[in-house]
Image: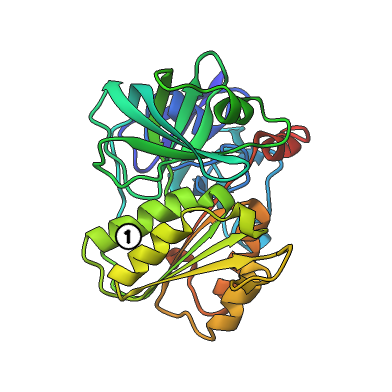
């Protein structure tokens, strides 16, 4: 037994089986429903429930606040219908709908960027062309290992796909990519996904905040903005723990020298020695630098705690929810915490 769920953006209702979520049913039907983590952590699948009854399994308050829930918003990835329903996912400004591709790729370059991050560049052998917007991500599979989500660090249209993969404690896939992956290995890439992409129509200031390997989508966004001729100020911050965690610093310094509207600021939260860089938590540094961010677009990517605290600070400085595009890098362990209580 199932329930008919009408999604206002779709031509035909979804037939959601008992116990299944709205999002999973849509994805199983190869329909493009906005989503990110699929575990109630990011809020990318936020939708409005117009009629019917649903039950939501546990989720992060960062993804859906109590006020939002009271106003009728739900998370499609956590919503199991208990009757026929009508919903609509929240429309994003400058909506993109790139074709989903299943790409057969080959490893062409592997570069050690830091003690725990490798840069992997892939050529597309079959399944292309691969269109995406700067800031989006894909599901990446190495051999028989489970797929993991990694953001593209290259610009759309570049010959090689670029991913930055940080080794996670206890992470089988990230350890393989950091220690065993070889030039010439086959890789499968499925995508693109994600809604924290570059909004080219915005003409106001841009603030781009990256933490750790969250530099990947921010790099793509900044490069794309400059390539498209953006003239507004672009304030880019790269937050890491210590100097050994910084990478591509010279590249972004050179980029800033060649583009007077780009300002690049590395920030160290726990420097082990004297440093010429800004120090402190990224959220505190940004809050100190800007008294008013009204009219700015803010792009954020990195560890969940960094993204959540930065979102709080920039919202307090006048950034509207519609101008705050956050991509929190949840590990499989982070996702499992919520799944365990489902």
Quadrant, the N terminus: top right
Residue drawn at x 26%, y 65% is 201
Q: Is residue 98 above or below residue 189?
A: below
In this view of the protein, which residue sits in the foreground, 148 or 186?
A: 186
In this rendering, the answer to whether 6 lies above or below 217 is above
Residue at disc 1, secondary structure: loop
Closer to the camera, 134 or 90? 134
Measured as percent of width and height from the top left, residue 328 is found at: 57, 50
Look at mark 1 in the image and give the residue it sits on. 199
In the displayed structure, would residue 141 be above or below residue 110? Answer: above
The residue most toward the bottom is 291
In which quadrant is the C terminus drawn? top right
Residue 237 visible in this rendered orientation of the protein: yes
Percent position (x, y) of residue 160?
Answer: 31, 35
Q: Does residue 264 appear left or right of residue 38 in this picture?
A: left
> In the depicted view, which residue is nearer to us: 322 or 5?
322
Q: Position of residue 296 (x, y in %)?
A: 41, 74
Residue sitting at 68 percent across and 45 percent down? 59
Compared with residue 1, is residue 39 higher up or lower down, i.e. above or below? Answer: below
Q: Farthest residue toward the top?
A: 144
Q: Which residue appears at 58% of the width and 31% of the height?
A: 178
Q: Residue at x 22, y 60 (%)?
A: 228
């Amino acid at each position: 037994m199932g329930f008919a769920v009408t999604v206002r953006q779709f031509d035909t209702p979804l037939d959601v089986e008992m116990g299944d979520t709205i999002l999973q049913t849509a994805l199983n039907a190869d329909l493009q429903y906005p989503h990110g983590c699929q575990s109630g952590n990011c809020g990318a699948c936020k939708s409005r429930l117009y009629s019917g009854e649903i039950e939501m399994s546990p989720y992060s308050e960062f993804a859906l606040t109590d006020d939002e829930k009271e106003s009728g918003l739900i998370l499609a990835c956590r919503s199991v219908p208990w009757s026929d329903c009508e919903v609509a996912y929240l429309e994003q400004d400058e909506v993109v709908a790139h074709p989903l591709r299943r790409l057969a790729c080959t490893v062409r370059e592997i570069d050690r960027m830091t003690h725990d991050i490798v840069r992997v560049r892939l050529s597309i052998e079959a399944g292309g062309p691969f269109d995406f917007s700067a800031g989006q991500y894909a599901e990446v599979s190495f051999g028989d290992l489970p797929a993991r989500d990694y953001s593209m660090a290259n610009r759309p249209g570049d010959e090689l796909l670029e991913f930055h993969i940080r080794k996670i404690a206890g992470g089988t896939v990230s350890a393989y990519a950091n220690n065993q992956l070889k030039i010439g290995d086959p890789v499968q890439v499925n995508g693109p996904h994600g809604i924290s992409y570059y909004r080219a129509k915005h003409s106001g200031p841009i603030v781009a905040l990256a933490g750790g390997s969250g530099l990947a989508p921010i790099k793509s966004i900044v490069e794309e903005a400059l390539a498209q001729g953006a003239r507004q100020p672009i304030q880019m911050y790269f937050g890491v723990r210590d100097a050994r965690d910084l990478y591509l610093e010279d590249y972004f310094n050179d980029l800033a020298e060649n583009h007077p509207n780009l300002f690049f600021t590395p920030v160290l939260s726990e420097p082990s020695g004297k440093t010429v860089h800004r120090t402190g938590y990224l959220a505190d540094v940004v809050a100190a630098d800007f008294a008013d961010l009204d009219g700015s677009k803010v792009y954020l990517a990195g560890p969940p705690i960094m993204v959540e605290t930065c979102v709080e600070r920039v919202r307090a400085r006048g950034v509207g929810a519609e101008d705050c595009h956050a991509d929190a890098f949840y590990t499989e362990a982070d996702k499992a915490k919520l799944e365990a209580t489902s």
